[in-house]
Image: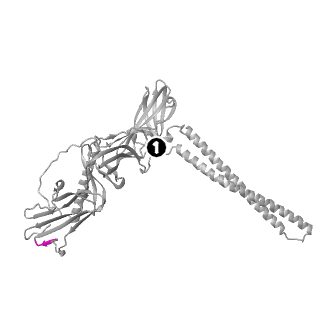
Amino acid sequence: MRYSLIPILFFPIAAIAEDFSVQAPVASAEVYPRGALVTRIAQVSVPKGQHRLIVTDLPPFDPATMQISLGGGAVVSSTQVVDASLASATFYERPEIQQAQAVFTEAQSALHAIELERAEAQAAIEAAKARIEFAKGLSQGEGATPDRQAIYDLAGVVGGLVTDGMKTRIAAQQKLEALAFRFSAAERDLARAREALEEVMPKAGVFQSVILNVSADAALESTLEITHAADASWSPNYEVRVTTGDTPMLEIKRRIGLTQQTGQDWTDVDLSFSTLTPSDVLDAREPAPLPRRIAKPTPQPAQPRMEMDSLASGLKAAVQAERRDHVATQYLGMDVRYAPAAKMDVASSELGGQVTQVELDMLSFDLADLYAIAVPQEYETAFLRAKVKNITDEVLLPGQATFYRDGLLAGGGQLPMLVPNASKEIGLGEIRGLRLKRIIRDRLEGDSGIITRANETTEQVVLRVENITDRAWDVRLMDRVPYSEQEDLQITWSADPTPTEEDVDGKRGVLAWRNQVAPDQTWNVTLSHRIKWPEGYILR
Protein backbone atom coordinates (compact mmCIF):
# COMPACT_ATOMS: atom_id res chain seq x y z
CA MET A 1 0.00 0.00 0.00
CA ARG A 2 1.40 3.43 -0.99
CA TYR A 3 0.92 6.42 1.26
CA SER A 4 1.29 10.03 0.21
CA LEU A 5 4.24 11.70 1.87
CA ILE A 6 4.17 15.10 3.56
CA PRO A 7 6.32 17.56 1.56
CA ILE A 8 9.55 18.80 3.13
CA LEU A 9 9.25 22.12 4.90
CA PHE A 10 12.37 24.23 4.36
CA PHE A 11 13.55 26.24 7.36
CA PRO A 12 15.95 29.16 7.50
CA ILE A 13 19.55 27.95 7.61
CA ALA A 14 20.20 29.75 10.87
CA ALA A 15 17.51 27.74 12.59
CA ILE A 16 19.08 24.39 11.70
CA ALA A 17 22.50 23.78 13.19
CA GLU A 18 23.11 20.23 11.98
CA ASP A 19 21.49 17.09 10.58
CA PHE A 20 21.74 13.86 12.58
CA SER A 21 20.92 10.60 10.79
CA VAL A 22 19.81 7.55 12.81
CA GLN A 23 18.26 4.18 12.08
CA ALA A 24 15.43 2.83 14.21
CA PRO A 25 14.89 -0.92 13.71
CA VAL A 26 11.67 -2.57 14.80
CA ALA A 27 11.90 -3.52 18.48
CA SER A 28 8.35 -4.78 19.09
CA ALA A 29 5.18 -5.47 17.14
CA GLU A 30 1.54 -5.96 18.14
CA VAL A 31 0.07 -8.00 15.29
CA TYR A 32 -3.65 -8.22 14.50
CA PRO A 33 -5.52 -10.56 12.15
CA ARG A 34 -5.19 -7.73 9.62
CA GLY A 35 -2.50 -5.14 10.28
CA ALA A 36 0.07 -4.47 12.99
CA LEU A 37 1.40 -1.70 15.20
CA VAL A 38 5.22 -1.67 15.32
CA THR A 39 7.51 0.26 17.65
CA ARG A 40 10.97 1.33 16.49
CA ILE A 41 13.72 2.38 18.94
CA ALA A 42 16.91 4.35 18.37
CA GLN A 43 19.49 5.81 20.74
CA VAL A 44 20.23 9.41 19.80
CA SER A 45 22.83 12.01 20.85
CA VAL A 46 22.00 15.63 20.06
CA PRO A 47 24.00 18.74 21.06
CA LYS A 48 22.44 21.92 22.37
CA GLY A 49 20.45 23.93 19.85
CA GLN A 50 18.01 23.34 17.00
CA HIS A 51 18.67 20.36 14.75
CA ARG A 52 17.09 17.98 12.30
CA LEU A 53 16.92 14.37 13.42
CA ILE A 54 16.51 12.16 10.34
CA VAL A 55 15.28 8.59 10.88
CA THR A 56 16.20 6.66 7.72
CA ASP A 57 15.37 3.37 5.98
CA LEU A 58 11.69 3.19 6.93
CA PRO A 59 9.20 1.27 4.78
CA PRO A 60 6.06 3.10 3.62
CA PHE A 61 3.37 3.52 6.29
CA ASP A 62 0.38 5.74 6.97
CA PRO A 63 1.77 8.94 8.57
CA ALA A 64 -1.55 9.44 10.39
CA THR A 65 -0.75 6.39 12.57
CA MET A 66 2.69 7.65 13.64
CA GLN A 67 3.43 8.39 17.30
CA ILE A 68 6.79 9.82 18.45
CA SER A 69 8.38 9.86 21.90
CA LEU A 70 11.74 11.55 22.62
CA GLY A 71 12.84 12.00 26.23
CA GLY A 72 15.62 14.00 27.81
CA GLY A 73 13.90 17.37 27.72
CA ALA A 74 14.04 17.79 23.94
CA VAL A 75 11.16 19.50 22.16
CA VAL A 76 9.95 18.13 18.80
CA SER A 77 8.45 21.13 17.00
CA SER A 78 7.42 19.39 13.76
CA THR A 79 7.71 16.12 11.87
CA GLN A 80 7.67 15.24 8.19
CA VAL A 81 7.60 11.93 6.33
CA VAL A 82 9.51 12.15 3.04
CA ASP A 83 11.13 9.98 0.40
CA ALA A 84 14.43 8.65 1.73
CA SER A 85 16.60 10.24 -0.97
CA LEU A 86 15.13 13.69 -0.23
CA ALA A 87 15.64 13.67 3.52
CA SER A 88 19.12 15.22 3.57
CA ALA A 89 21.64 16.75 1.19
CA THR A 90 24.28 14.52 2.80
CA PHE A 91 22.26 11.33 2.37
CA TYR A 92 24.65 9.91 -0.24
CA GLU A 93 27.64 10.65 2.02
CA ARG A 94 26.60 7.89 4.39
CA PRO A 95 29.56 5.53 5.00
CA GLU A 96 27.74 2.41 3.82
CA ILE A 97 26.77 4.09 0.53
CA GLN A 98 30.27 5.47 -0.04
CA GLN A 99 31.87 2.10 0.70
CA ALA A 100 29.48 0.24 -1.62
CA GLN A 101 30.05 2.88 -4.32
CA ALA A 102 33.84 2.50 -3.99
CA VAL A 103 33.63 -1.30 -4.32
CA PHE A 104 31.34 -0.93 -7.34
CA THR A 105 33.70 1.59 -9.03
CA GLU A 106 36.70 -0.67 -8.37
CA ALA A 107 34.85 -3.67 -9.88
CA GLN A 108 33.95 -1.57 -12.93
CA SER A 109 37.60 -0.51 -13.38
CA ALA A 110 38.85 -4.09 -13.03
CA LEU A 111 36.41 -5.31 -15.66
CA HIS A 112 37.35 -2.45 -17.99
CA ALA A 113 41.10 -3.25 -17.63
CA ILE A 114 40.46 -6.88 -18.55
CA GLU A 115 38.42 -5.78 -21.56
CA LEU A 116 41.44 -3.70 -22.73
CA GLU A 117 43.76 -6.71 -22.29
CA ARG A 118 41.37 -8.85 -24.30
CA ALA A 119 41.32 -6.24 -27.06
CA GLU A 120 45.16 -6.15 -27.12
CA ALA A 121 45.36 -9.95 -27.31
CA GLN A 122 42.82 -10.05 -30.10
CA ALA A 123 44.81 -7.36 -31.97
CA ALA A 124 48.00 -9.41 -31.57
CA ILE A 125 46.25 -12.43 -33.06
CA GLU A 126 45.04 -10.41 -36.04
CA ALA A 127 48.56 -8.91 -36.55
CA ALA A 128 50.11 -12.39 -36.45
CA LYS A 129 47.61 -13.60 -39.06
CA ALA A 130 48.55 -10.65 -41.29
CA ARG A 131 52.32 -11.38 -41.00
CA ILE A 132 51.76 -15.02 -41.89
CA GLU A 133 49.65 -14.08 -44.93
CA PHE A 134 52.32 -11.55 -45.98
CA ALA A 135 55.03 -14.18 -45.73
CA LYS A 136 52.98 -16.60 -47.82
CA GLY A 137 52.59 -13.88 -50.42
CA LEU A 138 56.38 -13.42 -50.69
CA SER A 139 56.86 -17.09 -51.37
CA GLN A 140 54.35 -16.98 -54.22
CA GLY A 141 55.65 -13.77 -55.86
CA GLU A 142 55.84 -13.52 -59.71
CA GLY A 143 58.85 -12.33 -61.79
CA ALA A 144 62.25 -13.61 -62.91
CA THR A 145 63.29 -17.02 -61.78
CA PRO A 146 65.73 -16.50 -58.90
CA ASP A 147 68.94 -18.48 -58.54
CA ARG A 148 69.29 -21.21 -55.94
CA GLN A 149 70.90 -18.98 -53.30
CA ALA A 150 68.15 -16.40 -53.62
CA ILE A 151 65.57 -19.14 -53.14
CA TYR A 152 67.31 -20.29 -49.96
CA ASP A 153 67.47 -16.73 -48.67
CA LEU A 154 63.79 -16.12 -49.45
CA ALA A 155 62.78 -19.36 -47.80
CA GLY A 156 64.65 -18.34 -44.67
CA VAL A 157 62.92 -15.00 -44.55
CA VAL A 158 59.46 -16.51 -45.13
CA GLY A 159 60.06 -19.26 -42.60
CA GLY A 160 61.16 -16.77 -39.99
CA LEU A 161 58.14 -14.57 -40.59
CA VAL A 162 55.73 -17.53 -40.41
CA THR A 163 57.40 -18.93 -37.28
CA ASP A 164 57.33 -15.58 -35.50
CA GLY A 165 53.70 -15.04 -36.53
CA MET A 166 52.61 -18.47 -35.32
CA LYS A 167 54.41 -17.99 -31.97
CA THR A 168 52.79 -14.58 -31.51
CA ARG A 169 49.38 -15.96 -32.47
CA ILE A 170 49.61 -18.93 -30.07
CA ALA A 171 50.76 -16.72 -27.19
CA ALA A 172 47.94 -14.24 -27.81
CA GLN A 173 45.36 -17.04 -27.97
CA GLN A 174 46.61 -18.50 -24.68
CA LYS A 175 46.39 -15.07 -23.07
CA LEU A 176 42.89 -14.59 -24.46
CA GLU A 177 41.77 -17.91 -22.97
CA ALA A 178 43.21 -16.97 -19.55
CA LEU A 179 41.52 -13.57 -19.79
CA ALA A 180 38.17 -15.28 -20.43
CA PHE A 181 38.24 -16.81 -16.94
CA ARG A 182 39.33 -13.50 -15.39
CA PHE A 183 36.59 -11.69 -17.31
CA SER A 184 33.87 -14.05 -16.01
CA ALA A 185 35.11 -13.62 -12.43
CA ALA A 186 35.21 -9.82 -12.86
CA GLU A 187 31.64 -9.86 -14.20
CA ARG A 188 30.50 -11.78 -11.11
CA ASP A 189 32.36 -9.34 -8.84
CA LEU A 190 30.68 -6.41 -10.59
CA ALA A 191 27.22 -8.03 -10.26
CA ARG A 192 27.77 -8.59 -6.53
CA ALA A 193 28.99 -5.02 -6.09
CA ARG A 194 25.95 -3.71 -7.97
CA GLU A 195 23.61 -5.72 -5.73
CA ALA A 196 25.39 -4.48 -2.61
CA LEU A 197 25.08 -0.88 -3.79
CA GLU A 198 21.40 -1.32 -4.61
CA GLU A 199 20.82 -2.67 -1.11
CA VAL A 200 22.03 0.53 0.56
CA MET A 201 20.77 3.00 -2.04
CA PRO A 202 17.29 4.47 -1.51
CA LYS A 203 14.57 3.23 -3.80
CA ALA A 204 11.96 5.76 -4.84
CA GLY A 205 8.67 4.98 -3.15
CA VAL A 206 10.12 1.96 -1.32
CA PHE A 207 11.89 3.59 1.62
CA GLN A 208 11.20 6.84 3.37
CA SER A 209 12.53 8.93 6.22
CA VAL A 210 11.03 10.76 9.15
CA ILE A 211 12.45 14.24 9.82
CA LEU A 212 12.09 15.62 13.33
CA ASN A 213 12.88 19.27 14.02
CA VAL A 214 14.30 19.12 17.53
CA SER A 215 15.23 21.82 20.03
CA ALA A 216 17.44 21.02 23.02
CA ASP A 217 18.43 23.38 25.80
CA ALA A 218 21.43 21.20 26.51
CA ALA A 219 23.26 18.27 24.94
CA LEU A 220 21.25 15.11 25.41
CA GLU A 221 21.42 11.37 24.97
CA SER A 222 17.99 9.82 24.83
CA THR A 223 15.81 7.06 23.41
CA LEU A 224 13.66 7.80 20.41
CA GLU A 225 10.52 5.68 19.94
CA ILE A 226 8.44 5.73 16.75
CA THR A 227 5.22 3.73 16.59
CA HIS A 228 3.24 3.29 13.37
CA ALA A 229 0.93 0.91 11.53
CA ALA A 230 2.48 -1.83 9.38
CA ASP A 231 1.37 -4.39 6.83
CA ALA A 232 1.25 -7.73 8.67
CA SER A 233 -1.27 -10.41 9.64
CA TRP A 234 -1.61 -13.62 11.62
CA SER A 235 -3.87 -16.64 11.89
CA PRO A 236 -3.94 -19.62 14.27
CA ASN A 237 -3.03 -23.09 13.07
CA TYR A 238 -2.73 -26.38 14.86
CA GLU A 239 -1.20 -29.83 14.87
CA VAL A 240 -3.72 -32.29 16.31
CA ARG A 241 -2.51 -35.76 17.36
CA VAL A 242 -4.80 -38.48 18.69
CA THR A 243 -3.77 -41.80 20.23
CA THR A 244 -6.43 -44.52 20.05
CA GLY A 245 -5.00 -47.13 22.44
CA ASP A 246 -6.38 -48.31 25.78
CA THR A 247 -6.05 -44.74 27.12
CA PRO A 248 -7.09 -42.43 24.28
CA MET A 249 -5.35 -39.07 24.35
CA LEU A 250 -5.58 -35.92 22.25
CA GLU A 251 -2.72 -33.42 21.96
CA ILE A 252 -3.04 -30.05 20.27
CA LYS A 253 0.08 -28.09 19.37
CA ARG A 254 -0.79 -24.44 18.93
CA ARG A 255 1.00 -22.26 16.40
CA ILE A 256 0.59 -18.84 14.89
CA GLY A 257 1.20 -18.25 11.20
CA LEU A 258 2.70 -14.75 10.87
CA THR A 259 3.18 -12.84 7.62
CA GLN A 260 4.58 -9.34 7.24
CA GLN A 261 4.91 -7.48 3.94
CA THR A 262 6.71 -4.30 4.99
CA GLY A 263 9.64 -4.86 2.63
CA GLN A 264 12.02 -4.91 5.61
CA ASP A 265 13.02 -7.90 7.74
CA TRP A 266 12.38 -7.75 11.48
CA THR A 267 15.29 -8.87 13.68
CA ASP A 268 15.14 -9.80 17.39
CA VAL A 269 11.63 -8.42 17.84
CA ASP A 270 9.23 -8.76 20.78
CA LEU A 271 5.96 -10.05 19.32
CA SER A 272 2.41 -10.09 20.63
CA PHE A 273 -0.76 -11.17 18.86
CA SER A 274 -4.29 -9.89 19.40
CA THR A 275 -7.62 -10.99 17.94
CA LEU A 276 -8.81 -7.39 17.86
CA THR A 277 -8.89 -5.77 14.44
CA PRO A 278 -8.60 -1.98 14.11
CA SER A 279 -11.73 -0.69 12.38
CA ASP A 280 -13.07 2.52 10.90
CA VAL A 281 -16.43 1.79 12.58
CA LEU A 282 -16.04 2.86 16.22
CA ASP A 283 -19.64 3.46 17.31
CA ALA A 284 -23.16 2.15 16.71
CA ARG A 285 -25.54 3.92 14.37
CA GLU A 286 -28.80 4.77 16.12
CA PRO A 287 -32.17 4.09 14.47
CA ALA A 288 -33.58 6.92 12.37
CA PRO A 289 -37.27 7.98 12.51
CA LEU A 290 -39.54 5.80 10.36
CA PRO A 291 -42.53 7.78 9.04
CA ARG A 292 -45.41 5.82 7.42
CA ARG A 293 -48.19 7.11 5.15
CA ILE A 294 -51.25 5.68 3.49
CA ALA A 295 -52.39 6.29 -0.07
CA LYS A 296 -54.67 4.75 -2.64
CA PRO A 297 -52.93 1.90 -4.45
CA THR A 298 -51.70 2.49 -7.98
CA PRO A 299 -51.36 -0.37 -10.45
CA GLN A 300 -47.80 -1.65 -10.77
CA PRO A 301 -46.55 -3.23 -13.98
CA ALA A 302 -45.85 -6.94 -13.50
CA GLN A 303 -42.17 -7.76 -13.55
CA PRO A 304 -40.99 -10.71 -15.65
CA ARG A 305 -40.34 -13.89 -13.71
CA MET A 306 -36.64 -13.78 -14.46
CA GLU A 307 -36.29 -10.28 -13.02
CA MET A 308 -38.19 -11.30 -9.88
CA ASP A 309 -35.97 -14.34 -9.38
CA SER A 310 -32.86 -12.22 -9.89
CA LEU A 311 -34.12 -9.65 -7.40
CA ALA A 312 -34.92 -12.35 -4.84
CA SER A 313 -31.45 -13.87 -5.28
CA GLY A 314 -29.82 -10.50 -4.83
CA LEU A 315 -31.77 -9.81 -1.65
CA LYS A 316 -30.94 -13.25 -0.29
CA ALA A 317 -27.23 -12.79 -1.07
CA ALA A 318 -27.24 -9.37 0.56
CA VAL A 319 -28.84 -10.75 3.72
CA GLN A 320 -26.37 -13.63 3.84
CA ALA A 321 -23.41 -11.29 3.36
CA GLU A 322 -24.69 -9.03 6.12
CA ARG A 323 -24.99 -11.99 8.47
CA ARG A 324 -21.47 -13.14 7.70
CA ASP A 325 -20.05 -9.69 8.38
CA HIS A 326 -22.00 -9.53 11.65
CA VAL A 327 -20.66 -12.86 12.83
CA ALA A 328 -17.10 -11.88 11.88
CA THR A 329 -17.46 -8.63 13.81
CA GLN A 330 -18.67 -10.46 16.92
CA TYR A 331 -15.83 -12.92 16.77
CA LEU A 332 -13.12 -10.33 16.18
CA GLY A 333 -14.45 -8.26 19.04
CA MET A 334 -13.42 -10.94 21.54
CA ASP A 335 -9.98 -9.91 22.75
CA VAL A 336 -7.56 -12.82 23.01
CA ARG A 337 -3.90 -11.89 23.24
CA TYR A 338 -0.75 -14.01 22.93
CA ALA A 339 2.72 -12.82 23.83
CA PRO A 340 5.53 -15.33 23.20
CA ALA A 341 8.40 -14.96 25.64
CA ALA A 342 11.23 -15.28 23.11
CA LYS A 343 12.19 -12.59 20.63
CA MET A 344 12.01 -13.56 16.98
CA ASP A 345 13.26 -12.76 13.48
CA VAL A 346 10.53 -12.31 10.87
CA ALA A 347 11.44 -12.09 7.19
CA SER A 348 9.42 -9.83 4.94
CA SER A 349 7.38 -11.47 2.20
CA GLU A 350 6.47 -9.12 -0.63
CA LEU A 351 3.73 -11.42 -1.96
CA GLY A 352 2.61 -12.79 1.42
CA GLY A 353 3.79 -16.30 0.55
CA GLN A 354 6.43 -16.64 3.29
CA VAL A 355 4.86 -17.52 6.64
CA THR A 356 6.77 -17.50 9.93
CA GLN A 357 5.49 -20.17 12.30
CA VAL A 358 5.44 -19.08 15.95
CA GLU A 359 5.22 -22.01 18.35
CA LEU A 360 2.97 -21.38 21.36
CA ASP A 361 2.46 -24.53 23.43
CA MET A 362 1.14 -28.10 23.55
CA LEU A 363 -2.19 -28.82 25.22
CA SER A 364 -3.24 -32.34 26.27
CA PHE A 365 -6.83 -33.52 26.69
CA ASP A 366 -8.46 -36.69 27.95
CA LEU A 367 -11.07 -37.73 25.45
CA ALA A 368 -14.60 -37.75 26.81
CA ASP A 369 -15.67 -40.00 23.93
CA LEU A 370 -13.86 -41.62 20.99
CA TYR A 371 -15.89 -43.59 18.48
CA ALA A 372 -16.41 -44.42 14.83
CA ILE A 373 -19.25 -42.53 13.18
CA ALA A 374 -20.97 -44.60 10.46
CA VAL A 375 -23.43 -43.00 8.00
CA PRO A 376 -24.00 -45.58 5.24
CA GLN A 377 -26.52 -43.29 3.53
CA GLU A 378 -23.59 -40.99 2.62
CA TYR A 379 -20.31 -42.91 2.90
CA GLU A 380 -18.81 -46.33 2.26
CA THR A 381 -16.42 -46.11 5.23
CA ALA A 382 -16.70 -44.93 8.82
CA PHE A 383 -14.86 -41.95 10.32
CA LEU A 384 -13.14 -41.54 13.66
CA ARG A 385 -14.70 -38.86 15.82
CA ALA A 386 -13.63 -37.52 19.23
CA LYS A 387 -15.54 -35.46 21.76
CA VAL A 388 -13.11 -33.04 23.36
CA LYS A 389 -13.70 -30.90 26.43
CA ASN A 390 -11.53 -27.84 26.92
CA ILE A 391 -10.45 -28.17 30.55
CA THR A 392 -7.89 -25.35 30.22
CA ASP A 393 -8.33 -21.62 30.74
CA GLU A 394 -7.29 -20.97 27.13
CA VAL A 395 -9.61 -20.20 24.23
CA LEU A 396 -8.86 -22.34 21.19
CA LEU A 397 -9.56 -20.09 18.22
CA PRO A 398 -10.85 -21.56 14.96
CA GLY A 399 -8.06 -22.26 12.54
CA GLN A 400 -6.48 -24.59 10.01
CA ALA A 401 -5.23 -27.86 11.48
CA THR A 402 -3.24 -30.90 10.42
CA PHE A 403 -4.56 -34.11 11.99
CA TYR A 404 -2.50 -37.20 12.91
CA ARG A 405 -3.91 -40.52 14.13
CA ASP A 406 -1.55 -42.90 15.92
CA GLY A 407 1.43 -41.14 14.35
CA LEU A 408 0.11 -41.24 10.77
CA LEU A 409 -1.14 -38.27 8.79
CA ALA A 410 -4.94 -38.34 8.64
CA GLY A 411 -5.53 -35.11 6.70
CA GLY A 412 -6.14 -31.40 7.05
CA GLY A 413 -9.19 -29.41 8.04
CA GLN A 414 -10.62 -26.75 10.29
CA LEU A 415 -10.48 -26.87 14.07
CA PRO A 416 -13.59 -25.22 15.58
CA MET A 417 -13.52 -22.62 18.34
CA LEU A 418 -13.40 -24.19 21.79
CA VAL A 419 -13.88 -21.96 24.83
CA PRO A 420 -12.98 -23.11 28.37
CA ASN A 421 -15.24 -25.88 29.79
CA ALA A 422 -16.98 -26.33 26.43
CA SER A 423 -17.07 -29.58 24.46
CA LYS A 424 -16.84 -30.11 20.72
CA GLU A 425 -16.80 -33.13 18.45
CA ILE A 426 -14.05 -33.16 15.86
CA GLY A 427 -13.47 -35.53 12.97
CA LEU A 428 -10.17 -37.42 12.76
CA GLY A 429 -10.30 -39.06 9.36
CA GLU A 430 -11.50 -42.24 7.67
CA ILE A 431 -11.34 -45.74 9.10
CA ARG A 432 -11.01 -47.65 5.85
CA GLY A 433 -11.33 -51.00 7.60
CA LEU A 434 -14.91 -50.22 8.69
CA ARG A 435 -16.97 -50.77 5.55
CA LEU A 436 -20.55 -49.55 5.28
CA LYS A 437 -23.53 -50.54 3.14
CA ARG A 438 -27.15 -49.40 2.96
CA ILE A 439 -29.15 -52.12 1.24
CA ILE A 440 -32.74 -51.59 0.06
CA ARG A 441 -34.47 -54.96 0.14
CA ASP A 442 -35.30 -56.15 -3.37
CA ARG A 443 -38.93 -57.35 -3.74
CA LEU A 444 -37.92 -59.55 -6.65
CA GLU A 445 -36.10 -61.73 -4.12
CA GLY A 446 -39.31 -62.38 -2.21
CA ASP A 447 -38.72 -59.71 0.46
CA SER A 448 -41.09 -56.86 1.11
CA GLY A 449 -38.73 -54.30 -0.46
CA ILE A 450 -40.24 -51.01 -1.60
CA ILE A 451 -43.98 -51.32 -2.19
CA THR A 452 -45.87 -48.29 -3.50
CA ARG A 453 -49.65 -48.05 -3.83
CA ALA A 454 -51.82 -45.10 -4.71
CA ASN A 455 -51.89 -43.86 -1.11
CA GLU A 456 -49.24 -45.95 0.64
CA THR A 457 -45.50 -46.61 0.44
CA THR A 458 -43.26 -48.93 2.43
CA GLU A 459 -39.48 -49.11 2.55
CA GLN A 460 -37.17 -51.54 4.31
CA VAL A 461 -33.40 -51.16 4.42
CA VAL A 462 -30.50 -53.00 6.02
CA LEU A 463 -27.66 -50.93 7.47
CA ARG A 464 -24.44 -52.93 7.49
CA VAL A 465 -21.10 -52.31 9.24
CA GLU A 466 -18.27 -54.73 8.44
CA ASN A 467 -15.07 -54.61 10.52
CA ILE A 468 -12.06 -55.96 8.62
CA THR A 469 -9.47 -54.39 10.96
CA ASP A 470 -7.56 -56.22 13.70
CA ARG A 471 -9.23 -54.34 16.58
CA ALA A 472 -12.70 -53.68 17.96
CA TRP A 473 -14.38 -50.33 17.33
CA ASP A 474 -17.04 -48.46 19.25
CA VAL A 475 -19.41 -47.61 16.38
CA ARG A 476 -22.19 -45.04 16.30
CA LEU A 477 -24.43 -45.93 13.34
CA MET A 478 -26.79 -43.21 12.08
CA ASP A 479 -29.70 -43.08 9.65
CA ARG A 480 -33.14 -41.49 9.40
CA VAL A 481 -36.84 -42.11 8.87
CA PRO A 482 -39.35 -39.59 7.51
CA TYR A 483 -41.63 -37.66 9.89
CA SER A 484 -44.99 -35.99 9.43
CA GLU A 485 -46.26 -32.55 10.36
CA GLN A 486 -49.83 -33.26 9.10
CA GLU A 487 -52.49 -35.23 10.91
CA ASP A 488 -53.68 -37.02 7.74
CA LEU A 489 -50.15 -38.10 6.81
CA GLN A 490 -49.44 -41.18 8.93
CA ILE A 491 -45.90 -42.50 9.27
CA THR A 492 -44.89 -45.54 11.29
CA TRP A 493 -41.46 -47.10 11.55
CA SER A 494 -39.65 -49.95 13.25
CA ALA A 495 -36.03 -50.97 13.75
CA ASP A 496 -34.21 -54.10 14.83
CA PRO A 497 -32.38 -53.57 17.10
CA THR A 498 -34.04 -50.58 18.72
CA PRO A 499 -32.10 -47.31 18.33
CA THR A 500 -30.15 -46.06 21.34
CA GLU A 501 -31.00 -42.46 20.36
CA GLU A 502 -34.01 -40.89 18.64
CA ASP A 503 -34.32 -37.36 17.26
CA VAL A 504 -30.58 -36.92 17.69
CA ASP A 505 -29.62 -33.34 18.65
CA GLY A 506 -33.24 -32.29 18.17
CA LYS A 507 -33.33 -33.40 14.52
CA ARG A 508 -36.64 -35.19 14.01
CA GLY A 509 -36.43 -38.65 12.49
CA VAL A 510 -32.66 -38.97 12.90
CA LEU A 511 -31.73 -42.22 14.67
CA ALA A 512 -28.52 -43.61 16.14
CA TRP A 513 -27.33 -47.00 17.35
CA ARG A 514 -24.23 -47.65 19.45
CA ASN A 515 -22.39 -50.98 19.42
CA GLN A 516 -18.94 -52.54 19.81
CA VAL A 517 -17.98 -54.23 16.53
CA ALA A 518 -15.26 -56.87 16.98
CA PRO A 519 -12.62 -57.75 14.34
CA ASP A 520 -14.06 -59.71 11.38
CA GLN A 521 -17.59 -59.04 12.69
CA THR A 522 -20.52 -57.78 10.59
CA TRP A 523 -23.25 -55.77 12.32
CA ASN A 524 -26.66 -55.46 10.65
CA VAL A 525 -29.53 -53.14 11.55
CA THR A 526 -32.93 -53.46 9.85
CA LEU A 527 -34.95 -50.27 9.49
CA SER A 528 -38.36 -49.94 7.88
CA HIS A 529 -41.11 -47.34 7.62
CA ARG A 530 -44.65 -47.09 6.20
CA ILE A 531 -46.33 -43.90 4.95
CA LYS A 532 -50.13 -43.66 4.40
CA TRP A 533 -52.23 -40.71 3.25
CA PRO A 534 -55.87 -40.11 2.16
CA GLU A 535 -57.16 -40.76 -1.33
CA GLY A 536 -56.89 -37.80 -3.65
CA TYR A 537 -53.55 -36.60 -2.29
CA ILE A 538 -50.00 -37.10 -3.50
CA LEU A 539 -46.87 -37.55 -1.38
CA ARG A 540 -44.28 -34.82 -1.54
Query: Where's residue 275, x and y in %?
Result: 32, 43
Q: Residue at x 44, y 32 (%)?
A: 224
Q: Residue at x 9, y 62 (%)?
A: 486
- Residue 186 shows up from this direction: yes
Residue at image mark 1: 265
Q: Is residue 347 left or right of residue 105?
A: left
Q: How is the image coloured?
A: one colour
Is 451 magenta? The answer is: yes
Vertical relation: 67 (above or below) 383: above
Query: Where's residue 191, x and y in %?
Result: 58, 50
Q: Is residue 98 left or right of residue 76?
A: right
- Alpha-carbon neighbours of circle 1 within 10 Å: few (<14), some, or many (≥20)? some
Where are the magenta residues, as a range?
450-454
Q: Amino acid at mark 1?
A: Asp
Q: Quadrant of residue 98?
A: top right
Query: Where's residue 78, x and y in %?
Result: 43, 33
Q: Is residue 122 left or right of residue 201?
A: right
Q: Residue furthest top?
A: 218
- In-front residue for pair 66/393: 393
